[in-house]
């Protein structure tokens, strides 16, 4: 069976087998494989929405011989994207966080926690280069936006004001931007991203700026050969996240026990259909070069879904 794929301007893009066409052409209201831990350069069709919901559980701790601290964060991340044009997509990202910090000193345990809406991120992504030929596509898209202080940043408990890292929000307006590139074929997809976030001061405290490099490979595990009548596709996912955080500042002075560089490796799986995706993965820290007694990441487990409409 042969299928002609036509864009919204009624121009024939290419003619290929029907099952391959369903998988490959990513600009006409279909779901597609994509990174689990960052964005993709693949477009959202003009006039359509994409919704992504992801649940993230993160655990951090430090050397008990120094001080016994355990930090756990459970985050529900809600993402809404809208295709303004075939090249421009606007996104809104709103997290809901549940944070707890457990400290043990001299046999006495102290738990401090909060939950609520986190800080809202708004950004746009624009495709500046695209190369579509039968069997593959390559795209490059810069993005830029701002994180707004929608979460509470002045919560207190019986011990006083909560530390900044336990607050649901930061209280600051933080710009960010970067560049993402995607190469997709019938069998696999590769994505790479470079980004930087500038954290500003609020409440006499400033989180360190964050720079990161990300890479992702999604490889089709099933079906091994494309054919008609397949309801979806199973992908194996392998990603890497290299993240550097500058030292925090309190009252203008740098905190020597904050910031550093972490490298995560991320194995995962995705099941992709025409309109929705289910995905899961675990971020495993393999290198942590942190400053002083900064908390080390134990893991981040991610599970979520996406759908287009």
Image: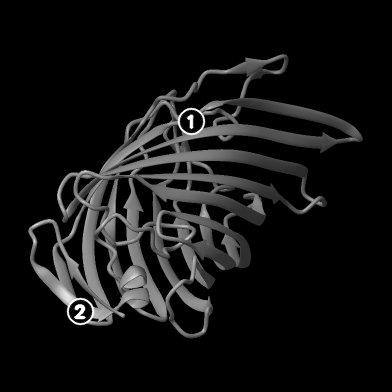
Residue 232's spot in the image, x, y percent? 49, 66
Disc on the earlier residue, 1 or 2: 2
Element carrying mark 2: strand
The nearer-to-camera label among 1 and 2 is 2
Residue 264's spot in the image, x, y percent? 56, 65
**Does residue 1 appear to the left or right of 88 in the view shown?**
right
Q: Quadrant of residue 128?
A: bottom left
Nearer to the camera, 7 or 176: 7
**Residue drawn at point x = 57 percent, y = 18 percent:** 155
Q: Which residue is mark 2?
A: 15
Q: Quadrant of residue 163?
A: top right
Q: Which residue is mark 1?
A: 118
10 Å crowding of disc 2: few (<14), some (14-19), many (20+): some
Q: What is the distance, in whole Å, between disc 1 and disc 2 at their CAs?
A: 46 Å
10 Å crowding of disc 1: few (<14), some (14-19), many (20+): many
On the question of residue 275 being in view, the answer is yes
Nearer to the camera, 48 or 103: 48
Instruction: Quadrant for the N terminus, please.
Output: bottom left
**Residue drawn at point x = 72 percent, y = 14 percent:** 158
Q: Residue at the far right: name it.
A: 107
**Residue drawn at point x = 48 percent, y = 30 percent:** 118
Element carrying mark 1: loop
The structure's colour scheme is one colour
């Amino acid at each position: 069976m042969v299928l002609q794929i036509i864009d919204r301007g009624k121009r024939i893009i290419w003619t290929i087998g029907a099952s391959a066409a369903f998988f490959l052409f990513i600009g006409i209201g279909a779901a597609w494989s994509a990174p689990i831990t960052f964005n993709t350069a693949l477009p959202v069709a003009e006039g359509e929405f994409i919704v992504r919901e992801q649940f993230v559980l993160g655990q951090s701790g430090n050397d008990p011989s120094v001080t016994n601290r355990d930090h756990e964060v459970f985050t529900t991340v809600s993402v809404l994207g809208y295709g303004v044009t075939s090249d421009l997509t606007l996104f809104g990202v709103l997290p809901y966080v549940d944070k707890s910090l457990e400290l043990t000193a001299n046999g006495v345990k102290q738990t401090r926690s909060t939950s609520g809406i986190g800080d809202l991120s708004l950004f746009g992504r624009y495709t500046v280069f695209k190369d579509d030929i039968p069997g593959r596509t390559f795209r490059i898209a810069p993005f830029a936006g701002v994180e707004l202080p929608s979460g509470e940043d002045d919560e207190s408990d019986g011990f006083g004001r909560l530390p900044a890292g336990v607050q649901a929000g930061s209280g600051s307006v933080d710009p960010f931007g970067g560049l993402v590139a995607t190469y997709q074929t019938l069998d696999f997809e590769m994505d790479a991203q470079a980004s930087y976030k500038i954290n500003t001061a609020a409440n006499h405290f400033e989180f360190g700026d964050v720079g990161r490099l990300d890479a992702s490979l999604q490889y089709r595990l099933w079906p091994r050969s494309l054919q008609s009548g397949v309801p979806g596709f199973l992908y194996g996912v392998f990603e890497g996240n290299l993240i550097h955080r500058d030292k925090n500042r309190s009252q203008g002075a740098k905190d020597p026990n904050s910031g550093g560089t972490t490298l995560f490796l991320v194995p995962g799986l995705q099941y992709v259909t025409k309109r929705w995706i289910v995905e899961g993965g675990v971020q495993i820290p393999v290198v942590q070069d942190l400053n002083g007694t900064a908390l080390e990441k134990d893991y981040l487990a991610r599970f979520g879904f996406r759908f287009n409409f």
